[in-house]
Image (tube, rainbow, N blue to C red):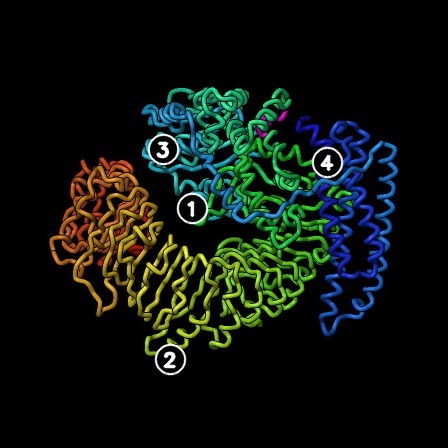
């Protein structure tokens, strides 16, 4: 097999061009079916493109792909293929434009007469294209290129049912570390050494080759319990990468600490902002992937000015030792050198363990002493102990035959040195990707920046815009399959998944990104980068006309951009255009000339209405407006006018989480639409509910709120939710709830009844329903997630036996509903529950919880039901002690008597809120002391105690909860004080103390010589004394200056 670099020069170009031609042949057939007036020219062009595709299959490319004459010929063919793609796009655009204009009753005269001219112009363009192809034929004859039989060129195969699910199941977490325990221990010792307490700043550097796992190692260290305790959980994580900007780094620190974007630009103002959070505190700053462009001395001075306490440290990862070596700090006595920790490759044992873990399921092939074992061992040694290389090799070998293993081992790629440091196993993984379409999709990832967080759905939409996914109704499905293949091949890492296992975000390792940039042979044709935007050539037509992508990362927020947007009028072949965070109030008219545009991102601007120029983009597939108005936090989505109906190819309207839209006139004509933002019926945009009901291809989530605006059953029926078969998540929300005696209750009953979805719905959420009965269709057999909120008047039984597929159940403030658990327990029904949340409803029986082996969240609170159904006793949570995955428990029921220090739940439970509701206590003594079982929950990080009316003292065994970070004390009227000083000193992880409705304790907290001096470190203290405020300015300044008072509201049992 020839090397990957040679393939990138010759064979890769040939394969890519053939893929484009295969796509063109499919498209041209569709254009001919439209019956255009220049069909004859198109048919002749189709014949020529078919012959050209045959030429590209010539075996001469495989044997002579370094022949410069052939490479030049290939480039010429490649350019013609792109030009032909542009030409067909224009043909399609003109047909769509004509269809749109003839649909209107009135239009301008110039539009009337433009059709004949357009047809003549397009026919001439096709003839010119045919002449270019003729010249290519002549050159092919001179080079001896002869056509051979076509083999499926694009390889964008149809997706088999369940294939994506199969790829999901194969995925293995790339964050687990093998063979790094000693490294973690030694780095923690360097960071937490007692001698650091005498220094203002300690620098520790992790140095090693790319792919050794420096980032993963530093993340594991920074999250370790010992490190979190040492730095009181004040850990700030930043990625520096090649481009270092001190102001940008400091600004990112502000964003992480304040959890909001910062528009500060002055360095002094930024430093002052950081002082408010960090001055006098010990913290750990992690700088990942630092290059030699890092200017240390000014940054050190800035950190010194911020002023953390003694023991503040900085953990740095870098490929170069000299980068860390120059990070000297100055102690009180002498210069302090940075501590450098050099990590090495994995040893043979750990390398083999990692390889076998990645190969999963190939145990027979790697059985000891077998041929597979010997071959895999030899290839593993070629990886040099580099974890990234070993993971890539394991993914490559997985599900392959021994014959294929031999072929991979014999590749000459192993012996070739790469100037860019790209690992051989990564090159081989790229070579063995299953088809050319997937290779094109991977190479397109070269547009992204190092360490950029990439949304899975956005990447698929970008691939679609470039035409990499064969045009069909299944483009998104093909894109998902490609995404999972690349994830399973170690090209993508650090993936985050939603609750149903779909990829939300991921990152690309620097080495993988380098590979993408090498194999992206036509990157100049793909991306108009943010660096090129300042190039003098960027204003010339010859430079701009060939670009198909203008994309820049959302992470590069305050960059100097080409504000005049002049390049748009010159870049008429763009498929992707990002104009984010520019403060635009209108788009230039030149945008309407982008006939090929399929992806438009205008997030972060200030549009009142959706710019009308967008409605002329007939090929547009994706429109993204993730924020609008002010740069962050705005709910406003630009008002959409009736012209939106022109966008017949629009598939995705992507908005921010809290942005809603009305229903515009013409929405029903968007027959291809799959993704739509939240529909708010209170927004009157002129359209009717029936327009939403006609969008039969909607997929994913459909959220409708403001349902009180529905006029009657007849209007609700026009929504016809039962025919929206691809909607898997339905969210219905009323804005208000009316009194039970209101005539509207019956109205709501009828409306919810006719809003019946299809039977395969997986998620249902209904909020603020004011009806009196549950609809009959609530028993959806395939429902995975059910959430009911504020059913203030609805009565009835919700029987879990009718919902056997449930994994997530949340019922809140549904006071008159009764939850009926399976009669024979969870062994037969709902045993896969992961979240069980019942707050403010009635339960009469609770089965043994032990069969719920997947349960992570359990909330059982205020489960006494309406006034005529109140219980006078608490239910024991039988089986709770045996739950191995439970992390969150909020309840006012009884902890089980068998909960002891050896119970599995003691190591898994991280958060618990425990209440003692008075009317559920048949024994008043239960409210005077905390359950003894709590002392065994040694893994607890957050503990809330509320409504223990007679509790006077907190027990000394509270000091056993050494992992505790947050302690909340709410509505404890007789609580007098915290535990003794010795107990409080044992709570070394404690950071936050929250007090509400505890008047006696609040009095102590307000005193300068009171309870807080039992702690040995500074806490964030949060209390609300309803009886009085601090009586003097001296007292206020003491509390605020020393203990950093925070004022967030406490809501019991909220998640």
Q: Which residue is mark 1?
A: 258
Q: Could you tell me which secondary element the residue under label 3 belongs to?
A: loop
- What number is the disc on residue 743? 2
- State which tag comes first along the sequence, 3 or 1: 3
Q: Which residue corresponds to the image point at 69% horizontal and 40% vertical from the top-left?
A: 532
Q: Which residue is mark 4?
A: 13
Tell me how far mark 3 sits from mark 1, CA to CA: 23 Å
Regarding residue 241, the answer to whether it shows in the image is: no
Disc 3 residue crowd, few under 14, some 14–19, many 20+, Cα 10 Å: some
Residue 628's image quarter? bottom right
Tell me how far mark 4 sits from mark 1, CA to CA: 49 Å
Q: Which residue is mark 3?
A: 224
- State which tag comes first along the sequence, 2 or 3: 3
Disc 4 residue crowd, few under 14, some 14–19, many 20+, Cα 10 Å: many
Of badges 2 and 4, the one in the foreground is 4
- State which tag comes first along the sequence, 2 or 4: 4
- What number is the disc on residue 975? none
Disc 2 residue crowd, few under 14, some 14–19, many 20+, Cα 10 Å: few
Q: In the rendered image of this protein, does residue 24 appear above or below residue 245?
A: below
- State which tag comes first along the sequence, 1 or 2: 1
Is disc 2 in contact with disc 4, using a CB cutoff of under 8 Å? no
Tell me how far mark 1 sits from mark 2, CA to CA: 48 Å
**338 drawn magenta:** no
* Residue 274 shown left or right of residue 542 in the figure: left
Is disc 4 in contact with disc 1, using a CB cutoff of under 8 Å? no
* Residue 171 shown left or right of residue 858 in the figure: right
């Amino acid at each position: 097999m020839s090397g990957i670099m040679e393939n990138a020069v010759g064979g890769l170009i040939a394969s890519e061009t053939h893929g484009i031609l295969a796509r063109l042949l499919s498209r041209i057939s569709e254009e001919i079916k439209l019956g255009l007036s220049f069909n004859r020219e198109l048919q002749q062009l189709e014949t020529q493109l078919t012959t050209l595709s045959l030429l590209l299959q010539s075996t001469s490319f495989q044997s002579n792909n370094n022949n410069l004459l052939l490479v030049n010929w290939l480039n010429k063919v490649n350019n013609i293929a792109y030009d032909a793609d542009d030409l067909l796009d224009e043909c399609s655009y003109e047909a769509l434009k004509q269809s749109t204009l003839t649909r209107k009753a009135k239009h301008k005269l110039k539009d009337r007469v433009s059709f004949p001219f357009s047809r003549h112009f397009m026919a001439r363009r096709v003839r010119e294209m045919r002449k270019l192809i003729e010249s290519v034929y002549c050159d092919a004859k001179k080079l001896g290129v002869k056509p051979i039989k076509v083999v499926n060129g694009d390889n964008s195969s149809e997706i088999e049912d369940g294939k994506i699910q199969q790829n999901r199941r194969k995925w293995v977490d790339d964050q687990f570390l093998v063979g790094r325990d000693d490294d973690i221990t030694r780095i923690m010792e360097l960071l937490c050494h007692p001698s650091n307490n005498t220094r203002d700043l300690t620098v520790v550097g992790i140095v090693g080759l790319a792919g050794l796992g420096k980032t993963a190692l530093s993340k594991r260290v920074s999250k370790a319990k010992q490190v979190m305790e040492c730095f009181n959980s004040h850990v700030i994580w930043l990625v520096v990468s090649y481009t270092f900007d001190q102001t940008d780094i400091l600004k990112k620190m502000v964003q992480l600490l304040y959890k909001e974007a910062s528009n500060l630009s002055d360095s002094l103002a930024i430093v002052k902002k950081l002082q408010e959070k960090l001055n006098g505190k010990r913290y750990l700053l992690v700088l990942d992937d630092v290059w030699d462009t890092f200017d240390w001395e000014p940054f050190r001075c800035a950190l010194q000015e911020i002023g953390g306490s003694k023991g503040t440290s900085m953990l740095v990862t870098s490929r170069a030792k000299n980068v860390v070596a120059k990070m000297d700090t100055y102690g009180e006595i002498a210069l302090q050198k940075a501590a450098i920790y050099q990590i090495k490759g994995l040893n043979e044992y750990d390398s083999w363990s990692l390889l076998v873990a990645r190969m999963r399921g190939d145990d027979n092939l790697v059985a000891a002493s077998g041929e597979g074992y010997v071959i895999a061992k030899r290839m593993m040694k070629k990886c040099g102990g580099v974890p990234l290389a070993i993971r890539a090799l394991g993914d490559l070998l997985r599900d392959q035959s021994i014959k294929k293993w031999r072929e991979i081992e014999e590749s000459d790629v192993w012996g070739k040195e790469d100037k860019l440091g790209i690992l051989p196993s990564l090159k081989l993984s790229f070579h063995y990707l299953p088809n050319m379409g997937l290779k094109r999709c991977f190479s397109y990832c070269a547009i992204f920046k190092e360490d950029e967080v990439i949304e899975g759905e956005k990447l698929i939409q970008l691939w679609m815009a470039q035409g990499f996914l064969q045009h069909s109704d299944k483009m998104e499905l093909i894109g998902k399959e490609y995404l999972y293949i690349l994830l399973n091949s170690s090209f993508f890492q650090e993936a985050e998944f939603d609750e149903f296992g779909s990829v939300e975000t991921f990152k690309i390792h620097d080495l993988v990104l380098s590979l993408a940039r090498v194999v992206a042979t036509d990157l100049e044709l793909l991306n108009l980068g943010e660096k090129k935007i300042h190039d003098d050539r960027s204003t010339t037509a010859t430079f701009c006309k060939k670009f198909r992508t203008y994309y820049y990362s959302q992470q590069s927020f305050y960059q100097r951009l080409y504000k005049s947007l002049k390049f748009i009028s010159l870049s008429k072949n763009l498929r992707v255009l990002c104009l984010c965070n520019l403060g635009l109030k209108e788009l230039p008219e030149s945008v309407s000339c982008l006939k090929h545009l399929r992806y438009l991102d205008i997030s972060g601007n200030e549009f009142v209405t959706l710019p009308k120029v967008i409605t002329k983009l007939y090929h547009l597939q994706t429109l993204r407006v993730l924020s609008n108005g002010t740069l962050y936090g705005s709910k406003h989505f630009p008002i959409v006018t009736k012209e939106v109906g022109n966008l017949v190819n629009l598939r995705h309207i992507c908005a921010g989480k809290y942005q809603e839209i009305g229903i515009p006139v013409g929405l029903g004509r968007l027959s291809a639409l799959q993704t739509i933002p939240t529909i708010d019926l209170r927004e009157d945009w002129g359209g009717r509910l029936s327009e939403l009901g006609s969008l039969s291809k909607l997929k994913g989530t459909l959220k409708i709120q403001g349902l009180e605006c529905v006029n009657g059953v007849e209007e609700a029926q026009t929504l016809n939710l039962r025919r929206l078969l691809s909607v898997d998540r339905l969210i219905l929300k009323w804005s208000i709830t009316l009194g039970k005696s209101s005539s509207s209750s019956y109205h709501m009953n009828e409306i919810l009844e006719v809003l019946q979805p299809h039977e395969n719905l997986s998620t249902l959420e209904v909020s603020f329903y004011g009806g009196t009965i549950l609809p009959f269709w609530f028993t959806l057999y395939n429902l995975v997630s059910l959430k009911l909120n504020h059913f203030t008047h609805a009565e009835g039984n919700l029987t879990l036996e009718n919902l056997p597929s449930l994994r997530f159940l949340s019922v809140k403030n549904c006071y008159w509903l009764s939850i009926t658990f399976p009669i024979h327990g969870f062994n037969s029904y709902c045993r896969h529950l992961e979240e069980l949340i019942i707050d403010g409803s009635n339960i009469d029986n609770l089965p043994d919880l032990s069969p719920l082996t997947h349960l992570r969240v359990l909330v059982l609170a205020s489960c006494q039901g309406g006034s005529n159904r109140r219980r006078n006793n608490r239910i024991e949570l039988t089986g709770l002690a045996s739950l191995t995955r439970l992390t969150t428990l909020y309840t006012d029921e009884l902890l089980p008597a068998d909960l002891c220090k050896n119970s599995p739940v003691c190591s898994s439970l991280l958060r618990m809120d425990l209440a003692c509701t008075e009317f559920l206590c048949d024994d008043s003594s239960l409210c005077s002391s905390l359950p003894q079982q709590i002392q065994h929950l040694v893994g607890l990080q957050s503990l809330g105690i509320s409504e223990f009316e007679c509790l006077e003292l907190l027990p000394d065994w509270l000091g056993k909860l050494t992992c505790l970070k947050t302690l909340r004390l709410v509505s404890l009227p007789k609580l007098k004080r915290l535990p003794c000083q010795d107990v409080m000193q044992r709570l070394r992880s404690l950071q936050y103390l929250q007090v509400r409705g505890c008047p006696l304790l609040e009095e102590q907290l307000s005193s300068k010589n009171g309870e807080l001096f039992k702690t040995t470190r500074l806490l964030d203290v949060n209390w609300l004394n309803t009886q009085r405020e601090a009586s003097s300015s001296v007292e206020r300044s003491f509390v605020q200056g020393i203990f950093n008072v925070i004022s967030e509201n406490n809501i019991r049992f909220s998640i």
